[in-house]
Image (tube, rainbow, N blue to C red):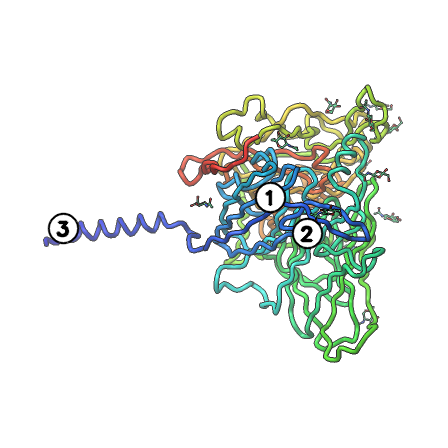
């Protein structure tokens, strides 16, 4: 063989090696994990009220979904109940797999009675605690559960290895049917009836009547470190949480590692998750300790002002010790916005070489959205509306109250049938300036009518300022973005000042997350890179505000390269 022929062969060999390196996907080493979700009715008794409620596999909370970073999840959801269902995998990026995201009429039509749909997606570049929940009407009140992503094999946590890991998931219990409650509220125009209890892992605990036997107990050994994977699945309430006589070390929020910090109390909005390390006392303390949560409230309406408790119990060497003293934590006042501001300031990305904070440094597009409540006129035929001054409650983003389409936006986009479904002209800022956090304007009415989306070319670098309004009173709104994590580069009180405020933005180690509380009477600035083609919902995670229209959608276009395009829909995608 001549040396030039040999050179040619080795060049071909080299070329083939290059090709195979290129076509092996980066995360292909993951395995596929299968789950079956059967949506069915189940009789459940809490607070001495028995009700028949919609569940996954007969349980609430539903099954714990566990994967490793890089795995594929294949979850078959079968609807055996009379209501329409969809499931959302909250916080999962769904890179190019938007068909599996789940919000009804945004990325899919609902799974109707008797139908099945397989949610099929990979977990790419994420590890930590997320969760899953129904994403249609108020059904997430009983359809929710943890989604735990472990690091890849042999990859340690960037903190002490915990002795045990325990999900702690907050929910809300309603004696009546939540679907009837929201239907009634939308009809009367007033605020919906509030829940009867908060729950920890489905259990209201000893502070409610007829509930002591339904108490979450965490039995611990002394001198160990526990990882609590805390999830707020409540419908309408941000929560403070604390364990008496114990300090918590926050290590992760929304499946992003943070610079660890100690605190007695955490604050968690609906949609957020928080991993904390709990170090137990070095010896048996001869006492038991309440872990307790109650709401952080900034709005004017009625709310469930009760507290939920579980018990942290040391496994005693001598089991005859009874009637132990029980210590209770001190939680901040219900309206402690000062605590909220101080707490959120402590949250910083780890921003280490292994876990960098890839904050977009240059911005292609700036957006300014007002978020808040407003009103709709009362139906002329019916003067019984129970909203402010005989109106109906509504809510909006840039004064547009989102109109839910009757077919899925993602399908309409993908098949080029957007005409009559949505218009691509969501406003980049409010139509009129007003003093957003000052005295309420004379006109509190919101705009509605069409479904508008904000279109972004692939890889647009976005800065979005969300400004709370005081039209019906200032209020904290936990905004959740689907399909992306974002960096929280700044926040403050009052009206955002585009001249002064950007000077103080943190572009070094801002917290990265998928749900952020827009401060009551303030603003928050976030940045994200629109590198995921599809239609992505953004909405307040207080379910009642979503029902009133505090929601919108981003449409991220395909990029030029094959791996920058939305994949085709699966064959079993539900139809409307
Ligand atoms: C918005 O819709 C509601 C109910 O669908 C209607 O009563 C109201 O008049 C509409 N508001 C505007 C400003 O068009
Ligand atoms: C729930 O209870 C009702 C009334 O007791 C009963 O008719 C029904 O079969 C029960 N449903 C289930 C799913 O167990
Ligand atoms: C899930 O998606 C992968 C990749 O597209 C495909 O190979 C697999 O067959 C799908 N599984 C199911 C059960 O649909
Ligand atoms: C809501 O509360 C009101 C007042 O207590 C009550 O009359 C109504 O029946 C409740 N609605 C639902 C759906 O529970
Ligand atoms: C008027 O509103 C009340 C309560 O909001 C409702 O019960 C009633 O059915 C409505 N009447 C009409 C004619 O829409
Ligand atoms: C728990 O804290 C309370 C109040 O700070 C204190 O009085 C009590 O001694 C502590 N108990 C234990 C067992 O640490
Ligand atoms: C919080 O509530 C208390 C008691 O109702 C009240 O005195 C206080 O002014 C409120 N604080 C804020 C910041 O609204
Ligand atoms: C928040 O921080 C400020 C400034 O450090 C402090 O004055 C205030 O007491 C803190 N508030 C709470 C509730 O911790
Ligand atoms: C209700 O009407 C009163 C009196 O006209 C007015 O002062 C108040 O601002 C109105 N409230 C809302 C929310 O429109
Ligand atoms: C907005 O309203 C607040 C509260 O009333 C007031 O302090 C502030 O000066 C107003 N800002 C402007 C620009 O008018
Ligand atoms: C709002 O109403 C007040 C009192 O009725 C009036 O003085 C003011 O001019 C109105 N402002 C606007 C912008 O219409
Ligand atoms: C379920 O969804 C389909 C498709 O959007 C719709 O036609 C039907 O009315 C819905 N059924 C119920 C009970 O809401
Ligand atoms: Cu809200």
Quarter holding residue 185: top right
| Numbered label attached to residue 88 | 1
Real-space CA distance between mark 1 and mark 3, rounded to the nearest whole angstrom: 57 Å
**Where does ligand 13 appear, by image quarter?**
top right
Q: Which residue is mark 3?
A: 5
Q: Is residue 81 left or right of residue 285?
A: left
Q: Residue at x 54, y 25 (%)?
A: 418
Q: Are marks 2 and 1 in contact (CB under 8 Å)?
A: no
**Res 499 seen here:** no
Q: Is residue 110 visible?
A: yes
- Say which label, 2 or 3, has the lower sequence index: 3
Quadrant hosting residue 322 = bottom right
Q: Position of residue 478 (x, y in %)?
A: 69, 44
Say whether mark 2 is within 8 Å of ligand 2. Answer: no
Q: Is residue 154 above or below residue 405?
A: below
Camera-side mark, 2 or 3: 2
Residue 512 in the image, given as x and y percentages of width and height: 60, 49
Residue to which mark 2 is pinned? 60
For disc 3, does the CB lie below 8 Å from ligand 3?
Answer: no
User: For the residues marked 2 and 1, what is the alpha-carbon distance in whole angstroms?
Assistant: 16 Å
Which of the image's four quarters has the C terminus?
Answer: top right
Number of other residues with Cα within 10 Å of mark 2, as a class: few under 14, some 14 to 19, many 20 or more: many
Residue 431 shown left or right of residue 462 in the figure: right
């Amino acid at each position: 063989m001549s040396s030039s022929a040999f050179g040619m062969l080795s060049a071909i060999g080299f070329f083939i090696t290059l090709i195979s390196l290129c076509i092996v996907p980066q995360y292909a080493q993951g395995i596929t994990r299968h789950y079956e979700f059967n949506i069915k009715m189940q009789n459940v008794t809490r607070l001495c009220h028995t009700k028949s409620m919609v569940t996954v596999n007969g349980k609430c909370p539903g099954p714990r979904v566990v994967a490793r970073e890089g795995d594929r999840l294949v979850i078959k959801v079968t609807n055996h109940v009379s209501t329409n269902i969809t499931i959302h995998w909250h916080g999962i990026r769904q890179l190019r797999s938007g068909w599996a995201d789940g919000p009804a009429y945004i990325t899919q039509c609902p799974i109707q009675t008797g139908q099945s749909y397989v949610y099929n997606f990979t977990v790419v570049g994420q590890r930590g605690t997320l969760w899953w929940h129904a994403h249609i009407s108020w059904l997430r009140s009983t359809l929710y559960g943890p989604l735990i992503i472990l690091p890849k094999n042999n990859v340690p946590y960037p903190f002490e290895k915990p002795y045990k890991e325990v999900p702690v998931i907050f929910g809300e219990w309603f004696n009546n049917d939540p679907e009837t409650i929201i239907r009634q509220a939308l009809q009367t125009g007033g605020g919906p009836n509030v829940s009867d209890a908060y729950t920890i892992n489905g259990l209201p605990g000893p502070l409610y009547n007829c509930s002591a036997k339904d108490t979450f107990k965490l039995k611990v050994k002394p001198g160990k470190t526990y990882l609590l994977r805390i999830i707020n699945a409540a419908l309408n309430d941000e929560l403070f949480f604390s364990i008496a006589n114990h300090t918590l070390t926050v290590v992760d929020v929304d499946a992003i590692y943070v610079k660890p910090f100690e605190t007695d109390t955490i604050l968690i909005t609906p949609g957020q998750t928080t991993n904390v390390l709990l170090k137990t006392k070095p010896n048996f303390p001869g006492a038991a300790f309440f872990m307790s949560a109650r709401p952080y409230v900034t709005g004017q309406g009625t709310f469930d002002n009760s507290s939920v408790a579980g018990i942290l119990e040391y496994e005693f060497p001598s089991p005859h010790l009874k009637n132990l003293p029980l210590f209770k934590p001190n939680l901040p006042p219900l309206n402690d916005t000062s605590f909220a501001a101080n707490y959120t300031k402590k949250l910083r990305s780890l921003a280490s070489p292994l876990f960098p904070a890839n904050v977009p440094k240059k911005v292609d597009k700036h957006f300014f959205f007002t978020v808040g409540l407003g009103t709709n006129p009362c139906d002329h035929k019916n003067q019984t509306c129970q909203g402010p001054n005989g109106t109906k409650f509504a809510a909006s983003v840039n004064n547009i109250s989102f109109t839910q389409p009757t077919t899925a936006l993602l399908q309409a986009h993908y098949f080029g049938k957007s005409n009559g479904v949505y218009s691509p002209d969501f406003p980049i800022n409010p139509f009129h300036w007003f003093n957003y956090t000052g005295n309420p304007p004379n006109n509190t009415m919101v705009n509605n009518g069409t479904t508008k989306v904000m279109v972004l070319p692939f890889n647009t670098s976005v800065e979005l300022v969300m400004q709370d309004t005081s039209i019906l009173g200032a209020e904290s709104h936990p905004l959740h973005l689907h399909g992306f994590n974002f960096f929280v580069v700044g926040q403050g009180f009052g009206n955002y000042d585009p001249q002064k405020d950007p000077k103080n933005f943190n572009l070094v180690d801002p917290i990265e997350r998928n749900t952020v509380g827009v401060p009551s009477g303030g603003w928050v600035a976030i940045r994200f890179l629109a590198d995921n083609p599809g239609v992505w919902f953004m909405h307040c995670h207080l379910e009642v505000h979503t029902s009133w229209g505090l929601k919108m959608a981003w449409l991220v276009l395909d990029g030029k390269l094959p791996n920058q395009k939305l994949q085709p829909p699966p064959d079993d995608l539900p139809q409307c």
